[in-house]
Amino acid sequence: MGNRAHEEGQEKQQVPLLTPYKMGEFQLSHRIVLAPLTRQRSYGNIPQPHAILYYSQRATRGGFILTEATGVSDTAQGYPYTPGIWTKEQVEAWKPIVDAVHAKGAIFFCQIWHVGRVSSTVFQPNEQAPVSCTDKGLAPQVRANGVDVAQFSPPRRLTTDEIPQIVNDFRLAARNAIEAGFDGVEIHGAHGYLIDQFFKDQVNDRTDQFGGSLENRCRFALEIAEAVTNEVGAYRVGMRLSPFANFMECADSNPKALGLYMAEALNKYGLLYCHMVEPRMRTVMEKSECPHSLLPMRKAFKGTFIAAGGYDREDGNKAIAENRADLVAYGRHFLANPDLPKRFELNAPLNKYNRETFYIPDPVVGYTDYPFLEETA
Ligand SMILES: Cc1cc2nc3c(=O)[nH]c(=O)nc-3n(C[C@H](O)[C@H](O)[C@H](O)COP(=O)(O)O)c2cc1C
């Protein structure tokens, strides 16, 4: 072995993010996860052929990647051109995308999602009101580009009797994801969407068994976890949570208790992983100093723990080296650097992300045109 190869071998050993990890039955070759990233390029809520290139660009042998948030039903949408997984046509459209990712040797989970009140009548069947745990509306929010303002319609509070139907939509979406070839599903319980609306006491004002106490506010998420794990097997189900975030006016008065309760409750269903957003992420993209940490939740949860939010190479390596997480999910850096694991391995400079093209419907620009390392050199 030449000196160079020897040195590279040594360098690799010093990069904790590039060490292998066994997540349940999935053998991962490194710990850099593609975070779920809504890209709004799925016209008619159907995943499009351009997603084949996008996801396979980010797939590596033994890497773990997540889809963008994917709607579980026709009431689950709140943004233009987000994909779904409730119709046969959508399932068929996902298949070539999944196949391409598998051809590169990656593990691919589908993030299943319901926006709840983060929607408006234009996204709803028959222009009906969006559904939520509450009928409290959401004030207009400035969009990610910092200019546009999103408007929301007042939601309709789900009756107790209607809740099993939504739980069932998640179950069917998970079944469909497996049918499409995904290796598993991630239940989206973060960022102010439907499940998070049930969790957080700023939003949940119910008086039935789905509101009030912490236990009651977590019931909806746990019924979904139970239904989904019964349907497809806990060994391929994860859940994403952001107890500390207040995105979409969805905050809790005791986020630590919420995070801990959920970490412990998910153990009961044997979930493969818990994917938690760092407390420093008060909204999806805004990082701020925060005295809290995910450590209590990391310790409480028995499966794989994925941390996300504001990580760079150094910070991610530190989290792995200090055993604060098993895996680290990268959002914006992975969006802009399709070869992020390679760049981290070489400690190469990163492409800068352009937030103006995060959500445009263009099938190429800001999507599949971020350069790989060889091209920049
Ligand atoms: C363009 C964009 C789209 C996002 N879409 C989703 C999503 O669909 N589901 C989700 O759980 N989080 C979503 N997020 C949050 C990211 O997964 C991640 O938690 C966030 O970007 C913070 O991580 P970062 O600092 O590595 O970017 C999105 C973030 C961005 C920037």
Image (cartoon, helix red, strand yellow):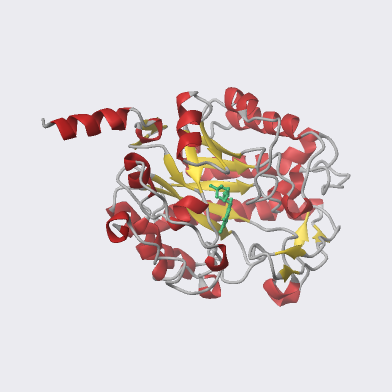
Quadrant showing the N terminus? top left
Query: What is the x, y in percent for residue 78?
Result: 67, 66
Quadrant showing the C terminus? bottom left
Query: What is the x, y in percent for residue 305?
Result: 52, 32
Please state if 100 lies on the left or on the right of 141 as rendered. left
Please state if 187 lies on the left or on the right of 175 as rendered. right
Q: Is residue 54 above or below residue 108?
A: below
Please state if 72 lies on the left or on the right of 122 as rendered. left
Q: Quadrant of residue 97?
A: bottom left
Q: Residue at x 65, y 57 (%)?
A: 114
Q: Residue furthest left?
A: 1
Q: Residue at x 61, y 71 (%)?
A: 80
Q: Residue at x 27, y 56 (%)?
A: 374
In front of the other: 327 or 174: 327
In front of the other: 199 or 343: 343
Q: Quadrant of residue 96?
A: bottom left
Query: What is the x, y in percent for residue 53?
Result: 36, 64
